[in-house]
Amino acid sequence: MAAPPVDAGRLSYRWVMLALLCAGYGSFGLVSSSLAPLVGPILRDTGMTRGEMGLVLGSWQFVYLFMAIPAGMAIDRFGLRIALFAGIALVALSQALRAGAFDQVTMLGAVMVFGLGGPFISVGAPKLVATWFSPREVGMALGVYTVSPSVGSMIVTATANSVLMPATGDSWRLTLLVFAAFAAVAAIAWLVLAREPRAAPGATVEPTGSTWSAFGALLRIRVVQVVLVMAVGCFLVNHSLNNWLPEVLRAQGMTPSQAGFWASFPTLVAIPSALLIPRLTTARWLTAVQVGLFALWAVAMLLLPFGAGTMPYLGLLLIGVGRGAAAPLLMLTLLRSPAIGPHLMGAAGGLFFAAGEVGGVLGPTLTGVLADATGGFASGLLALSVVGGLLAALALVLRSATQRESATVTLTA
């Protein structure tokens, strides 16, 4: 990936932009995870079943997958400042609407609003990194912003039942409004402080290419094809766990507070995983690291329902390692691809997240339906284990595609 020409102003302001992005992406994680620890009281108040809640939890991903590609085009057309503000503001609105929901239909609509705003944040994030940071810093910046939604998710799972519910008189509605306030502050901060990057004097500005022909060209690249298939599986596992892990732990006998604490543990582990693994993983070791991470996922899913003694806690640890680094390593593959530069990262990011959210829709819904059908979560976790094994195999296919792309670029250089 060629380095974007930058001026001194961009070099000094890139850390402010990264901090603002982290606040916005943290709100993304905060809101997307806000219902999971409150499923019990929400089901009692709204009369929904687990299967219906699974549909609600996966509904924003359904909207997201149709919005991701248009979001990428909008980001390249209108710029990061306008697009990301719209995204963060819609995320805050979604959270406020959830607090007023009274049945499945109103909760479904509130959650679907998140699917309108979320793509602007997650698709815009790699575009921001590719634009503001040099190739040498991309892995570090990618790891930093990737941690942000995990931090937001961890705050929710750790505080919803143990701090905010008692403080609000066991009101899940007021608890959700507290989280909405955080997202609103992030939106205002972005609007006030965010800037568009300036190219260095005399630099040639490349066309964005965010047209349908650009998407078609990207889809013909073998590396992109394999990454998109892997994104489906990666998001399927991640979103299933994000939405159902507290309930899985409660079903195994934990109290709501205990389940909230231990459900946040994988997110805590994901933070150093996201910060360190993408930064330290070189192209030479990328495949081995990916195979190892996905294999750990496969084992972890089996340890949760079938492990004895401390084995389920080991499973939570392994889930956290995979959660932190799996998706960032796939995105890093796109960022390092010689066929994709900063001018195409909006389009490439749109494709990545559109494909990923296909899994994001299927995962929570499948887990909820299997739980209703079998009376427990063992069958759903077994299915997630199979997905982890398939992802490990696909990592080997990705290595072959990457090697062929590198050889082609070398021959044509």
Image (tube, helix red, strand yellow):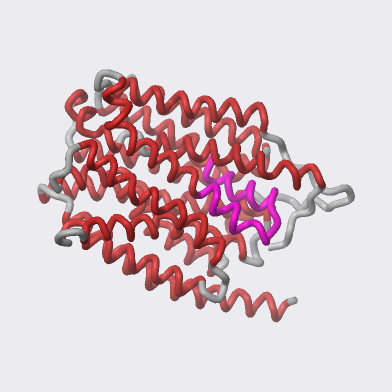
In this rendering, position of residue 28 left or right of residue 195: left
Q: Is residue 128 above or below residue 183?
A: below
- Magenta region, residue range: 120-146
> What's the residue at 64%, 61% (across, down)?
340
Q: Is residue 46 above or below residue 387?
A: above
Within the magenta stretch, is there residue 276? no
Magenta residues: mostly which secondary structure? helix
Give how far across and how far down residue 305 sits, in percent: 17, 57
In this rendering, position of residue 344 left or right of residue 362: right
Give how far across and how far down residue 399 sits, in percent: 50, 75
Give how far across and how far down residue 303 sits, in percent: 21, 61
> What's the residue at 39%, 33% (across, down)?
112
Within the magenta stretch, is there residue 144? yes
Give how far across and how far down residue 77 sits, in percent: 67, 41
The quarter of the displayed image where residue 402 is located: bottom right
In this rendered view, identify the residue nearer to me: 10 or 216.
10
In the displayed orientation, state which residue is furthest to the left: 375
In this rendering, position of residue 29 left or right of residue 38: right
Q: Is residue 135 above or below residue 375?
A: below
The quarter of the displayed image where residue 71 is located: top right
In this rendered view, identify the residue nearer to me: 383 or 252.
252
